[in-house]
Image: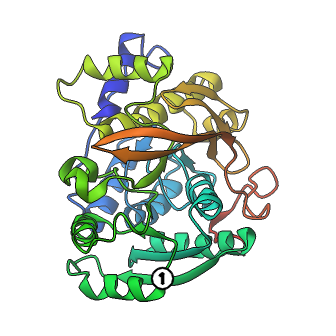
Amino acid sequence: MCTEFAVKELNAAGGLLSKQIVLKAYDCQSHIKKGLQYAQQAALRNAVMAVGALTGAAREATRPVLRKYKVPYFYGSSYEGDACEQNIFCCNTEGNQQVVLLVERSFKTLGNKLYYIASDYNAPRTFGARNQVMAKREGGKALADDYYPLDVTDFTAAIAKIRAAKPDFIHSFLVSGSSTSFYRQWAAAGMLKKNPLISIIFGGGQEHEILAPEEINGIYAVYNSFEELDTPRNKAWRAFLKRWVKVMHTSMARRSVDTIQSCRGAEAVNRANSFDRDAVMKAWGTGITWEGPGGKMVTDGATHHTTQDVRIIRVENRVWSLVATKEQIQPDSYGDGCDFFAQPDLTEFLMPQM
């Protein structure tokens, strides 16, 4: 939806290089095979930019197709990081920009024993590795990495394990129905007021609106921006959204990245004065600055990620409040292992440095 808004705004301002933008949307219905099919269709129909394939599995399936046909791929999900390839442009927060800030502060303010409970797929396991890194750096201890299949909804045994481990705080990366089930059962067990919960994804699925306040009060999250952020840029963004939608949710406010990636892709095209993929990549590498609702965002040519402000927030009665801000966090270079200026042909999936 936000990509559609961006296209309408860009077209109203004259389009790109005096051409009107045509948005073609494909519904993959969460099927990887359909994603591959549609990516190839779009490429063969002369697409000049691709946006989407939001899950990690969809991203990893799609990017080789778009690379083959030289279609620049703008990826807007907040994700684990690790994708190191010139043809992908990552506009949202990545691993070190979220988890490092939140876990580092938690070790300083909540205690030195962390317990990690997460859904079992690639992204949570990558963040589990980052927990271990942060525990070592901060002199703390990651007591457990506890992973569960996506369809698990009974966390009675898991909560018993957490009780027995006696952590100072819990880091949750449970997704989908698992997340709401866990938070409800955690509160019902009387644990919410005893053990602080942190999560780099909580609220992204509107859990704070779905669950009762007594089931989620006090949970910490971390994002570039949030609906209640009291800045002129965020107020302007909310006014922009209200021109298109009548009812707005916090997660929609954070989907600003869909708009931002489209606008920065457009700026790269304008700066390159060309739709050519190589020219667009070169323009991205010059450092494109964009003032989004969360503040200044700058493209990083070495990694094709984004330098940006990141904020720790806390929910109370379904309203987020600001806890801390760290300005202009640079993306992870993986020990200089991801540097397109030095190695332009990289197509790696890297892991955080231990």
Q: Which residue is mark 1?
A: 166
**Residue 200 higher or lower than 181, as above or below:** above
Query: In the picture provided, is 199 more to the left or to the right than 139?
Result: left
Query: Quarter holding the N terminus?
Result: top left
In front of the other: 11 or 253: 253
Q: Nearer the viewer, residue 266 or 219?
A: 219
| Residue at position x 50%, y 78% in the image | 167
Residue density around tag 1, few if under 14, some if 14–19, many if 20 or more, within 10 Å:
some
Give the x, y percent position of residue 55.
37, 60
Say what secondary structure mark 1 lies in: loop
Quadrant housing residue 235: top left
Q: Amino acid at mark 1?
A: Lys
Q: Residue at x 23, y 31 (%)?
A: 248
The residue positioned 28% from the left and 76% from the top of the image is 150
State the colouring used for the structure image. Answer: rainbow
Residue 51, image quadrant: top left
The answer, for residue 8, to whether it is visible in the render is no
* Residue 234 point in image, percent of width and height: 45, 24
